[in-house]
Image: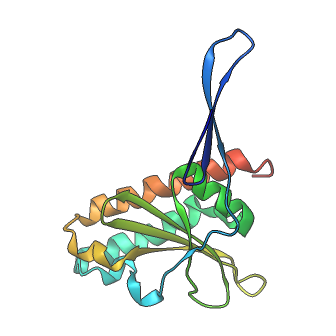
Amino acid sequence: MKHSNVGELYEARTNPTNQFILVCSYSYDRGKSVKKIERTQLLALKEMGYGQSCYAIDSMHKREMAIRTRDLRLVNKVMAEKIALLVGGEIVDIAIDSATEWAIMMQPLNNLRIYYILQRYNPEFEDEVIVLYGKETASIGIPIDDLYDFTRLCANALVRAAKNSLPQI
């Protein structure tokens, strides 16, 4: 018996001791269309309208994300697709500029979309993972500290999936 869900294939099997188990394997449909997101649909943390407190958190956020997402800079587009599936994220088509390699959207809450975007600036500058938010985030009333925590938790999930998927990390 097989059951297919978005990006997943579930198969009922028995193991050597005849116990019933459910096996889940991920498959990415390369023919699947990827959602196009325009830059105008996204906001940076400091564009959210949190006022002066946002600038201190934005600065801390950028420093911490640069350290936290260092391992994600080693991920190519094919591996990003696998990682997105593993953590419940979604590959999306966003082009900040010609340096954009991949973008993963995570949605920890109904109206909270967090976009992690790899920019390959190499060799002139260091590669960078940029974090942006769906425009609707500014209107859902989430405190900036909570927004920052969700961003960190989702980044942790992406990094852990990358470390488990790539032996060289």
Q: Nearer the viewer, residue 87 or 99?
A: 87
In this rendering, the answer to whether 123 lies above or below 152 is: below
Please state the horizontal and vertical placement of residue 130, each as a whole percent of the image. Answer: 53, 75
Image quadrant where residue 19 sits = top right
158 or 82, which is in the foreground? 82
Q: Residue at x 22, y 64 (%)?
A: 143
Furthest residue toward front: 1
Please state the horizontal and vertical placement of residue 72, each as a whole percent of the image: 65, 62
Q: How many marks?
A: 0
Instruction: Give me the residue at 36% from left, 56% from top.
Output: 149
Residue at the left extreme? 141
State the scheme by which the image is colored: rainbow
Left or right: where 114 falls relative to 28: left
Quarter of the image with the N terminus is top right
Residues 15 and 164: in front is 15
* Residue that protrudes farthest toward the top in the picture: 17
Residue 118 in picture, x, y percent from top left: 62, 74
Residue located at (40% from left, 80% from top)? 44
Q: Quadrant of residue 76?
A: bottom right
- In the image, taking residue 112 as reference, residue 77 lies left or right, namely right
| 30 left or right of 20 in image | right
Question: Vertically, is 72 above or below 127?
Answer: above
